[in-house]
Structures are given as C-alpha cells and as structure tokens.
Image: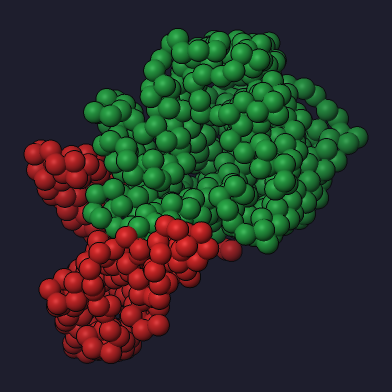
Amino acid sequence: MAHEHAIGGHAGHDDHEHHGPPSGIMRWITTTNHKDIGSMYLWFSFIMFLVGGAMALVIRAELFQPGLQVVSPDFFNQMITLHALIMVFGAIMPAFVGFSNWMIPLQIGAPDMAFARMNNWSFWILPVASFLLILSMFVPGGAPGTGWTLYPPLSVQQGMGMDLAIFGIHLLGMSSIMGGINIITTILNMRAPGMTLMKMPMFCWTWLITAFLLIASMPVLAGAVTMLLTDRHFGTTFFNAAGGGDPVLFQHIFWFFGHPEVYIIALPAFGVISQVIPAFSRKPIFGYASMVYAIAAIAIISFFVWAHHMYVTGIPLTGQLYFMYATMIIAVPTGVKVFNWVATMWKGSLSFETPMLFALGFLFLFTLGGFSGLVLAITAVDILLQETYYVIAHFHYVMVAGAVFSAYAGAYYWLPKWTGYMYDETLGKWHFWLTLIFFNMTFFVQHFLGLAGMPRRVPDYALQFTEFNMISSIGAFGLGISQLLFLYIVLKARKSGKKVDAQVWDGAEGLEWTVPSPAPYHTFETPPVFEGGKH
Amino acid sequence: MSQPASHYFVPQPSHWPIFGSGALLLMATGAVLWMNKLAAGPYLLSAGFFVLLTMLFGWFANVIGESEGGSYGKNVDVSFRWGMSWFIFSEVMFFAAFFGALFYIRVLSVPDLAEGLSGEFLYQGFSAAWPSAGPGFKGEFSPMGAWGLPAINTALLLTSGVTLTWAHHALIKNNRLHLNLGLAATILLGFLFLFLQVEEYVHAYGELNLKLTTGGYGSTFFMLTGFHGFHVTLGAVMLCVILARCLKGHFKPDHHFGFEGVAWYWHFVDVVWLLLFVLVYWL
C-alpha cells in the first residue's frame, strides 16, 4: 500500500475517486473517510450511552428505597465511577467528535479531515480504552470505587481495577489529543476559499476552541493519573503528606483539567444549538461576532476557576473569594450566548420540528443548570451543598439537558443529510416530550434532596428522603427506556423513511446543504468557492 | 486562505491504526498485570511493544513513501506544521502538570506541614527547608547539585541545538556534507547527554541516597528529569531516522518538514531542560 502512491502527482487520490470503499468489516477497520469515522463515533457513543445508562439504572434501583437491597455498597461505588467515566469519555465526548468528523469537512468545504489516517486511530483507540474500563469490573477488587474524580488517598489504596482505569484514561486522552489536533488543523488549514474565520459556521467555531481545550487539558489529566500510578506502585509521594506531598494536590491538577473538560462537553453543544435555532427561526444567528468572543472568553476563563470544586479542602479565604468571583464571571459570556439564541428567535418565522424542540429544551434546561451552577459558585452556599444531591442535579442539567439534548438536536437535524431519509416526525416529537418529562422527573427533585442534605455517592439514605428518591428512580427508568425509542426512530428512518433533497430544512444555511442527501462518500474534492457570509 | 488548485492528499484506507490500537491494548494490560506482579505482564508488554514498533515502521514507511512520491503539496505541508505545533503544545502541558506539582510541594505543602497544627502536634521538629523528603522520611539524602554533571549537560544540549541549526542551514543551502555532519554531531551530543544522565542517576542512587522514593524531592526530581530523558531518547531516535533519510538523499532545500518537525521537537526538549536546570537543579 505504501508504494502505490509513489508514482507521483495525485495517483493515490484518483484511485480513491474511482473505487468505493473496501467491503465488509475491513471497510470500517481501515477507513480514512471522515464520514465513516464520524458514523463509527456516533454509533459507538450511542452504545456507550446505553451501557452508562444501564449503570445509572443500577444506581437508581438501589436508591428507589432506603436500606440496601439491590447491590452491595462496594458495587454501588463502582457503578458510580464507571457510569461517570463512560458517560463523559465514552458517550458525550465521542458523540460530539462524531458530529465534528461528519460535519466540519462538509461545513468548511474540505475533502476530509487534515490527518485522515490518524483520524482512524483516534477512533479505534476508544474501544480499547472502554474495554479496559469495563474489564476493571472483572478483576480482583473490582472497578475503582472512588467516583470519576479518582481522589487519593482512596484511589491509591484501590486494587488493580484502578490501574486498568488509569491506563484507560491515558488512552482516552491520547485519542482526544489526536482528535483535537486533527480538528484544529482541519479548521485552520482546509477552509474553502472565501471562508474567512469570521464567516465560518458557528459549529466549527465551537470545535476550534474545544479542540484547543482538549489539547491543553488532556495532558494535564495524563500527568495527574501518572502521578497516581507512581504513588501506587513506585513509591513516589506526590499525594502523601509523609513525603511532603498532599492529597489536595491531586484535586488541583485534576480540576485544572476537569473544569475545561466541562466546556469541552458544553461548547460543541452550544455549536449545534447555534446551527439549529437559526435554521428553524429562518433568520441568521443574532450577534455572530459576540457569539465567537463569548466562546473564546468561556474557554479562557475555564482555566482559572478550578478550585470552585474545592471550597471545603481548606484553601485560603482569599482563594475562595477569587474562585467565587472568577466562576461567576463565566455567567457573563454564557448569558451573552443565551441572549443571542433568544434574540435569534425574536420575530423569526418559527417552526417546531424535533431538532428545534430539543434545542428549546436545551435552552430552558441548560440555563436552569447554569443558574444552579451560580448558586454553587457562592462559597458560603457551596459549603452547605458540597457533596449533596444538589450538585448531582446541577451537573445533570448541564450534561444531560445540555449536552445530550443538544446531541439529539444535532442528530435529528443532520440525520436526513447523513442517511438521505427523513425520520418519523411524530415519533421524534414523542421522543422529545418523553425525554423532557422523564428528565425533569429524575433530576428536578434532586435539587430538593440536595437542599435537604442528602449526600451523594452513598447507597443508603435517611427515611425522609424516600418520596423524592422514588420519583427520581421512576423518572430514571422512564428516561432510560425512552432512549430506546431513538434507536427505533433511526432504524425506521433508514428502512422506510421518506427520501429527502439536498436542502432538507428550508431555513438551514451552510455548505453541507449544497451536497446531495445522503452526502456522497467523497465530497468537496475540489474546494467550492464560498460566497456566503451574511454575518 | 486560498488553496492551490491541486487536490488535498487524502490517504487510502490503512491497516496501521488498528495495529496501533492492538499494541496499546497489549501494552496497557501487560503493564497493569506486571505492576500487580502477575507473570503474564512482561510478556504482554513486550509483545505490545513489538507490535507498536511494527506499526511505527509500517506507518512511517507509508508516510515517507508518499512524501518522496510527491503526494504532499503545499497545503499538506501547512497541515503538518499546525499538527506538530499543537502536538508540542500538548507536551508542554504534560510537563506543566509536573512542574506544577513541584511548585505546589515546594511552596505550599511542605511549609504547611511544618506550620500550624500539623507542625505543632503531628510532625514536631519537622523543618520546611527545601530540598525536603517530607516529615515521614527516615534517613539522610543529599540533593543533586547543579554545577557538576547538570551544568555539563546544559552545555551539551545547548550545543546540540546549535549543531542542529547548522545542519538545517546546510540543508537549505543544499550542502549535504554539512547537513550530515551537523546531524551526526547533534545525535552524538544527544546520546552523550543521555549517558551522563544515567551516570547522574547512578551517582544519586549509589552515593547521595537520592531515590524515586525519597519523598517530595525524590518524586519530583526523578519524574521530571526521567520524563525529560525519555523525551530526549525519543528525539534522538527521531534524529537518527532523519539522518538515515538524509544519507539516502531524502529532503529538498524547499521541502523538508520531516527534518523541521524533529528539529522543533529537539528545541522543545532543550527548553524543557533549561527549565529543569533552573527550577530542579539550581534554585
């Protein structure tokens, strides 16, 4: 294979044009095509979403009533850890990387990602890493029971499941860094002539900045878990006071990664919403430039707020005050974004197809999650709410109602472009309303539980918390089952959906709508001339 | 942002990435088993490393073949430049985590342990003077001085940066002899540096009683210098590959990003060393 192209010019390229992909499983294993890789990311993330969801249901089954009935406390802790790691690294992040693979080349008019072979590797590391995470459940001592934050000293004392998780995280980091480098290079170097940075679709802007966050923060996580590994096995004392170290040091390094990570998840979600709302309002996005600056501001500030996760670790009062104010400042650019989305809809010619419904669900619920974040940012309040269900409610409003709703908005919005078939609108609306209702049933009540003082990561609870926990658990099972409907909708669309044209949505703008539906295997091999730019 | 009329090169399907993933699977499970003292560990790890080497040979052979075959136009070259820059940035952030740990232990956690309640009740008589192996460390150790081997090593690495730049200028002027000489000198200085680092570790373990397990000082000293040494090793191997390619007549005065990428990496490793010399050895 190495020498076929050595003949010169664009021999390799022309080969590509005249032959389809290899057939069977080898197509998917060896592919360098951004659409194939995007599809694999999306399918993988959905499978992991179901796996992580099943783990959440184990947790909710145990918490349905007080006392210990379904699983042992130890296994409960393992489920807590793996649910989070799998949802964050296996489901949400790959989902948005899948969108980026599919859509960025289509949106900027590029033939593929900048490093197509490395793109394949970025994907195929993920199943290995997830295998290591899941394998940790089956070794002596079981999976880590520390929660996804892996705080020492507990994580130093765990069994070999922790080592598997550490190497799993290393591999996930490698995959993310390679993916980040690929995306950033593609956007910076492969835009169609005429598409200046400030004319780029908003989804590409969010990914440009997310890719920077990935490259800057994942190596720091790698450093943190490496220190954990050497503390566990090679006698270093980074997190051990006897050697002059400090367990709190781990928290500092972890959250220096962890807070940007929140925006690694949130920014691409913002990007999808910024595509969907203008399309169904039939207006260009309001305040394009301010949107770009807001994304950049959020990303930069996200590196300077990490200790708001650590108010009760004994950091000095001045530190608490600084991190409180810095955290609140993030609400300003985020507020700009929410304002702009609302202003985009103002006097628009609105219609409410499923992508728009999920985008509106995102807008309401993510904003609520942002507000509870502001509540938690207040040091004096956080000291009471730290490690309670209020925190759980807060970040599930951001992660599920933020990232997952946005991923669904994007999936319904672009599914006809990917497959060439329209999904069943009635079923899509059912999926939205069931998800919306069950989501709030699951998580809204957790605010009350947290305010009443129910601690997180504990399999048992005091009697007075029973009713709200029962409501939450019933909601969780409803939420879980409703997601299977999405699988059915996708399969049904592919089997018996109505064929669609290139311009699937009449209000949608961008180069992706100029190629046929389904998008051909190779697109924009000769860069198009971009004449858009209403902004 | 105008692109040349020619197509951007998109490679054929490749089986190398899946080899890489297999290698990582074997190496990760092998390392975990080894660390937990299970017999299969070293075998799996070595098997994984072998697969990784095969993958690296095959993949880079592919890339070199495509490059020499003229598949990489101007635009692909720009992609490589962005890619390498961001990769080096990710490495900077990796080292930043360890420099951050050094700062935290030296400036915050060690003084904290000697002060207040912990100094009064837990660790009476513990003095916060750096270098410190922490209040629980029994025995004596000496820190590594800056003006012996480390100073010589600084000179070696700085000189290697100069010889590499000499080689690069020779490549641009198409003076192949000076190119090869400059590269060979750089590689020689790099391996000399590594040899002296090993000597320094032997000295530390044998005479200074300074080990990886010597508390905060030992942890940060060996992890920082160790990861740096590992990066120098990688850089030296990469330089060897570049020298071999130069001897085969690869690279042109106006098209040689393979050379430049490795040169960037080498200079990055150089800068990290300067930080190490000042923050770990000297101050």
In this view, A289 is above or below B181: above
From what the image shows, is residue A268 above or below residue A293? Answer: above
Residue B32 placement: quadrant: top left
Nearest the viewer among A453 and A135 is A453
**Left or right: B209 in relation to B218:** left
Measured along the vertical axis of the image, is residue A280 above or below residue A243?
Answer: above
Q: Is residue A443 left or right of residue B120?
A: right
Total labels drawn: 0
**Where is residue A317 drawn, in percent x and y?**
67, 58
The residue shown at (45%, 58%) is: B121
Q: Is residue B75 above or below residue A187?
A: below
**Chain B, hue in figure:** red
Q: Please state, as top left, top right, bottom left or bottom right, where the N terminus of chain B lies in the image.
A: bottom right
Residue B29, given in percent of the width and then of the height, sits at 21, 39
Q: Residue at x 27, y 25 (%)?
A: A138
Residue B135 showing in the rendered view: yes
Front position in the image: A41 or A237: A237
Q: Identify the residue shown where x is 64% and y is 17%.
A: A465
Image location of residue A448, percent across then percent down: 71, 24
In percent of width and height, residue B98 lies at: 40, 63
Q: Nearer the viewer, residue A326 or A406?
A: A326
Residue B268 lies in quadrant: bottom left
Picture quarter with the C terminus of chain B: bottom left
Q: Is residue B179 left or right of residue B263?
A: left
**Chain A colour?**
green
Q: Residue at x 28, y 53 (%)?
A: A230
B37 sits to left or right of B216? left
Structure colour scheme: by chain
